[in-house]
Image (cartoon, helix red, strand yellow):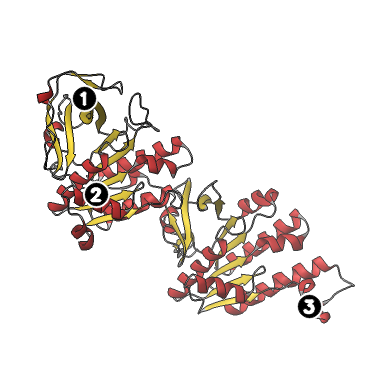
C-alpha cells in the first residue's frame, strides 16, 4: 500500500478543504449529488483546475454537456481549462451519424458498453491523476435497471481505484431511489442544495454525508457561486478556535463609562435594547469612535441603514468617522439580509478578526439579522456560536436590538438577553410635554455597574448623560414616568 493512499487532496474550493479536514481522499471515488443548477459542474472544474496548478494530469468526462458548454461556464467564472483533457461521450442513439444506428443488437447494451469502454480507453491512454465523471444520470438511463446500474458504477469505481485516480462522480438526482446504492459504494458523498426563499436571492448549502476515515465538520454549510467559482462558508464552531488576547476595557470617553462601572470588558458582548430612534446606533458609534482613536480596528455591520447615512449621522454628533474608513481601520459593511446567508455573514466576521485584527464589532441591528434567518431558533444558535467565538478572541461586541413599538408595552422580536454579558436598556419617557430618553444597565456579568436610571441626551456634542434620577416609576414596565424635580433633568441646549 502506498504511503499517501487516501491522503487528503485539495479540492480547489475555498472553505471545502476545512470541512473535509484537508480535502478529498486520494485514489478514491467521491459522489457529488444535487439538483440541476446546484453547482456540481463548477465544483468539478475547480477540482481539476487545482490539479493542473499542481502539475497533475486531469480529465473531464462529460455525457451531459459539450466541451463548448464547459468552456463557456469556465469563461463566465474567469477560469481557464488549459491543461484539462475533455472527453465528450455521445451514445450512438443520440448521434446523427447513420452509420452508428443499430437494429440487430439491443441498443441499450451497445450504448452502455461502448460509452463505458470509450471512457476506460481514454483513461488508459492518458493515465490521469484526477477525473470528473459528469454525470451518472446518463449511465442510469442507459442501464435501464437499478441492478445493472449499480454493477456498472461499481465496476467503474474498481477501475479507477486500480489506476490510482482521484474521482468525482456527479449525479443530478433524477432517481431518488438510487441514492443509497451510490452512497454505499462511494468513499465520500457530498450533497449540494439550492433553496428558494419567498423573497430574496437563492440560498445554497452543502452537506458532507460521509467521508470514510475522516472526522467531518458535519451539518449544513452555506456556499455561493460567484465569478471565480464555488466558495464555501464553513459553519462557525467556536470551540475550534484558540483564545485571543484580552486587554483593558473599551471606553466611550463619556459618562456612559461610569454607568457601566468602567467601560466594556474585553471578550464580552453588550446588548443595546430599546425602541427605534432612541439612540442605540449613536451609543454604538460613540464606543466605535473612541476605539478608533486609540488605534484599534473596528467592524460595523449595517443592516438597517446605508453607510452614507451612518457616516452623516455620526458627523452630526461630532464623530468624524470618514477618515478611519479611508485609512482602512473602520470596516463599514452594508448588509443586504435578502441576499446574504448567515454562513457568509459569520465568515465575514471571522475575516475581519483574523485578517484585519478588528477589536470591536458592532451589529446594527439584530432585528435586520433576524430577517436574514428563516427561523428564530436558528438565529439564537447562530448568535451563540458567533458571540462565543468573539468572546474567546477578546473582542468587544455591541449588539443592537429594536423593540416592537415606540411607547408603552414593548416586546423584543427575539430573546437574546441570556446570551449577552451586558444589557443596556433604553426607554422614552414623558415630562413636561416633552419626550425624553432614559438609560439603565440591567445586567453586567463582568464587574460592577450602576443600578440607577439616568437621563441621556443626544446633541451636536454627542451623548450626554445626566445624574441618577431617583423619582422614576415604571421604566421596566415600558411606561416610565418621572415624578421628580424639573431641575434634576438635563437642560435643553439653546443656540
| Secondary structure under the numbered disc 2 in the rendered image | helix
The answer to whether marks 3 and 2 mark residues whose Cβ atoms lie closer than 8 Å is no
Q: Earlier in the sequence, mark 2 or mark 1?
A: 2
Any part of residue 155 in sight: yes
Number of other residues with Cα within 10 Å of mark 3, as a class: few under 14, some 14 to 19, many 20 or more: few
Query: Of the residues tagged 2 and 1, which is closer to the observer?
Result: 1
The disc placed on residue 431 is 1
| Secondary structure under the numbered disc 3 in the rendered image | loop
In the depicted structure, whether residue 47 falls above or below residue 22: below
What residue is at 31 percent from the left and 45 percent from the top?
A: 363
Quarter of the view holding residue 394: top left
Number of numbered discs on residues: 3
Q: Identify residue for label 2.
A: 313
What residue is at 14 percent from the left and 45 percent from the top?
A: 247
Distance between the alpha carbons at the discs numbered 2 and 1: 26 Å
Quarter of the view holding residue 14: bottom left
Q: Earlier in the sequence, mark 3 or mark 2?
A: 3
Q: Position of residue 480 (x, y in %)?
A: 26, 22
Distance between the alpha carbons at the discs numbered 3 and 1: 87 Å
Q: Position of residue 229 (x, y in %)?
A: 48, 65
Q: Earlier in the sequence, mark 3 or mark 1?
A: 3
Q: Identify residue for label 3.
A: 96
Q: Position of residue 263 (x, y in %)?
A: 14, 38
Q: Position of residue 115 (x, y in %)?
A: 72, 71
Number of other residues with Cα within 10 Å of mark 2, as a class: few under 14, some 14 to 19, many 20 or more: some
Q: Nearer the viewer, residue 491 or 48?
A: 491
Any part of residue 212 in sight: no
Drawn side of residue 229 relative to residue 64, left or right? left
Amino acid at each position: 500500500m502506498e504511503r499517501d493512499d487516501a491522503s487528503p487532496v485539495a479540492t480547489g474550493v475555498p472553505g471545502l478543504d476545512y470541512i473535509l479536514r484537508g480535502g478529498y481522499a486520494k485514489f478514491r471515488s467521491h459522489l457529488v449529488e444535487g439538483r440541476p443548477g446546484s453547482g456540481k459542474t463548477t465544483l468539478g472544474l475547480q477540482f481539476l483546475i487545482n490539479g493542473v496548478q499542481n502539475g497533475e494530469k486531469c480529465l473531464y468526462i462529460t455525457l451531459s454537456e459539450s466541451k463548448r458548454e464547459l468552456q463557456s461556464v469556465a469563461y463566465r467564472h474567469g477560469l481557464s481549462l488549459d491543461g484539462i483533457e475533455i472527453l465528450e461521450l455521445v451514445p450512438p442513439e443520440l448521434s446523427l451519424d447513420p452509420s452508428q444506428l443499430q437494429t440487430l443488437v439491443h441498443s441499450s447494451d451497445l450504448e452502455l458498453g461502448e460509452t463505458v469502454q470509450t471512457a476506460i480507453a481514454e483513461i488508459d491512454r492518458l493515465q490521469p491523476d484526477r477525473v470528473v465523471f459528469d454525470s451518472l444520470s446518463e449511465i442510469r438511463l442507459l442501464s435501464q435497471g437499478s441492478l445493472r446500474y449499480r454493477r456498472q458504477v461499481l465496476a467503474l469505481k474498481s477501475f479507477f481505484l486500480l489506476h490510482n485516480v482521484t474521482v468525482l462522480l456527479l449525479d443530478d438526482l433524477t432517481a431518488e431511489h438510487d441514492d443509497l446504492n451510490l452512497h454505499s459504494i462511494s468513499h465520500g458523498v457530498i450533497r449540494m442544495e439550492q433553496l428558494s426563499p419567498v423573497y430574496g436571492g437563492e440560498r445554497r448549502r452543502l452537506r458532507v454525508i460521509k467521508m470514510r476515515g475522516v472526522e467531518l465538520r458535519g451539518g449544513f454549510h452555506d456556499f455561493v457561486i460567484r465569478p471565480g467559482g464555488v466558495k464555501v462558508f464553513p459553519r462557525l464552531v467556536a470551540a475550534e478556535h484558540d483564545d485571543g488576547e484580552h486587554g483593558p476595557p473599551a471606553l466611550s470617553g463619556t459618562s456612559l463609562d461610569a454607568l457601566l462601572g468602567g467601560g466594556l470588558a474585553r471578550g464580552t458582548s453588550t446588548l443595546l435594547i430599546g425602541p427605534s430612534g432612541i439612540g442605540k446606533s449613536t451609543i454604538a458609534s460613540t464606543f466605535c469612535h473612541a476605539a478608533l482613536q486609540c488605534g484599534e480596528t473596528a467592524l460595523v455591520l449595517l443592516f438597517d441603514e446605508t453607510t452614507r447615512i451612518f457616516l452623516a449621522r455620526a458627523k452630526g454628533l461630532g464623530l468624524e468617522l470618514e477618515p478611519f474608513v479611508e485609512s482602512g481601520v473602520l470596516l463599514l459593511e452594508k448588509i443586504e439580509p435578502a441576499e446574504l446567508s448567515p454562513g457568509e455573514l459569520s465568515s465575514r466576521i471571522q475575516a475581519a478578526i483574523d485578517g484585519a485584527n478588528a477589536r470591536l464589532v458592532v451589529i446594527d441591528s439584530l432585528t435586520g439579522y433576524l430577517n436574514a434567518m428563516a427561523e428564530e431558533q436558528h438565529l439564537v444558535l447562530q448568535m451563540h456560536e458567533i458571540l462565543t467565538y468573539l468572546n474567546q478572541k477578546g473582542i468587544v461586541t455591541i449588539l443592537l436590538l429594536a423593540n416592537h413599538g415606540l411607547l408603552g408595552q414593548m416586546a423584543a422580536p427575539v430573546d437574546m438577553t441570556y446570551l449577552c454579558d451586558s444589557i443596556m436598556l433604553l426607554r422614552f419617557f414623558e415630562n413636561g410635554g416633552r419626550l425624553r430618553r432614559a438609560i439603565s444597565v440591567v445586567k453586567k456579568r463582568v464587574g460592577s455597574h450602576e443600578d440607577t436610571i439616568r437621563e441621556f441626551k443626544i446633541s451636536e456634542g454627542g451623548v450626554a448623560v445626566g445624574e441618577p434620577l431617583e423619582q422614576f416609576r415604571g421604566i421596566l414596565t415600558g411606561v416610565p414616568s418621572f415624578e421628580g424635580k424639573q431641575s434634576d433633568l438635563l437642560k435643553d441646549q439653546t443656540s
